[in-house]
Amino acid sequence: MPFAQVVIGPPGSGKTTYCNGMYQFLNGMERKTTIVNLDPANETLPYPTDISILELISLEDTMENLQLGPNGGIIYCMEYLAENMDWLEEKLKACGDDYIVFDCPGQVELYTHNDAMKRILNRLEKIGYRLCCVHLVDAHYCTDAAKYISVLLLSLKTMLQLELPHVNVLSKIDLVETYGRLPMSLDFYTNVQDLSYLQYHLSQDPFLKRFQQLNEALCDLIEDFGLVGFETLCIQDKESVTRVVRAIDKAGGYVFGGLEAANESIFMTAMRTASEWENVVQDVQERYVEGGDPHEDLERFAREYKMDKDEDLSGEGSGQPGGSGPERRHGEKKVSFADE
């Protein structure tokens, strides 16, 4: 039973960079991973892929032949893919039980209004894929109360529309204060705590002050559902990537029956994840909101992490990390680390 991540998010949220870093990390920990490009506008890929929607249809050709704009063209491309899923299914057969990362378009209407993406994902579930949606949003939106509430509404609508195991991620957390100081501590934003505290900040804006009752209603709506929360991610930070991978594995069910060679019983796996896989937001705040240090190479850490986990399971130690990681293909780019 193959597992997969469905990587979505607004334009500029870092989806392609995330897919590239995740490809390096997962292959580094000896989890064979394949990236599938489903973005018809993304013609320059930093990662290797044998499956791309560009082989079926491209945004440029669609806009030229049908006289559509960029947004309308992408919606047409995804509807075309939804009607021609036999092509994608045939391509995926060659991947076997590889762990799949789907790099999806950034048009938010595909995940909030149009049903083409939902039909595609439902078809993938029917052929046996265990999907987990990874929704990336730029962390700097937290510095503005109005933008943060907009992100919460977008995340909530996407969760309700796609109806998949869901992990919301604040990407580029290392740049969170580039556009200003956070009004509150980071855990307020990751845990989506009492949103009434944001109403004071909204009332400071002369324009938003006019819509106080609407702001209160939107905050109440989000809190009533109680579904939205966030992980934090800096793709250059080994520990940050590890926490996100663990959250995704737990949400998607990989930890309860993944494809690892040393996979123990479901109960031992659940116990391990409960004790080890806890996101410490305070540590993230100290590192990125209050200053911090760069980290080491992502692929090397992934191999060391995999080795340490195998030792914990078997009770036996080994001297050197196993394997040298996947061979880099021509044209493939490596994630740029802060200390390189």
Image: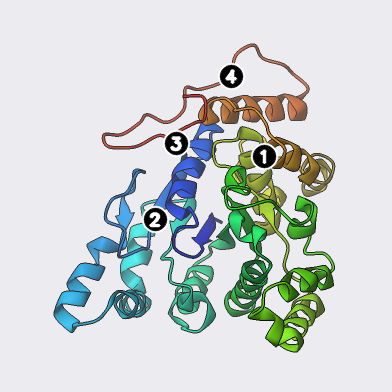
Report the mark closest to the observer, 1 or 4: 1
SS at badge 4: loop
Q: Earlier in the sequence, mark 1 or mark 4?
A: 1
Q: Nearer the viewer, residue 198 or 43?
A: 198
Q: Earlier in the sequence, mark 2 or mark 1?
A: 2
Which residue position holds label 2?
36
Between the residue at mark 3 and the residue at mark 2, the CA separation in whole angstroms equals: 18 Å
**What residue is rendered at 58% in x and 47% in y?**
178
| Residue 98 at least partly seen | no
Which residue position holds label 3?
335
Instruction: Residue 290 in the image: state x and y as whole percent.
Output: 72, 38
Q: Earlier in the sequence, mark 4 or mark 2?
A: 2
Horizontal side of residue 311 vs 19, given as left or right: right
At label 3, the amino acid type is Val
Assign the N terminus to one quadrant of the image.
bottom right
Report the mark closest to the observer, 2 or 1: 1
Report the mark closest to the observer, 1 or 3: 1
SS at badge 3: loop
Report the mark closest to the observer, 3 or 4: 3
When asked about the image quadrant of residue 335, the answer is top left
Instruction: Residue 63 in the image: state x and y as whole percent.
Output: 21, 76
Q: Nearer the viewer, residue 272 or 77?
A: 77
Mark drawn on residue 170: none
Query: Which residue is farthest top?
Result: 319
Which residue position holds label 4?
321
Q: Nearer the viewer, residue 167 or 292?
A: 292
Which residue position holds label 1?
288
Between the residue at mark 1 and the residue at mark 4, the CA separation in whole angstroms equals: 29 Å
SS at badge 2: strand
Between the residue at mark 1 and the residue at mark 3, the CA separation in whole angstroms equals: 19 Å
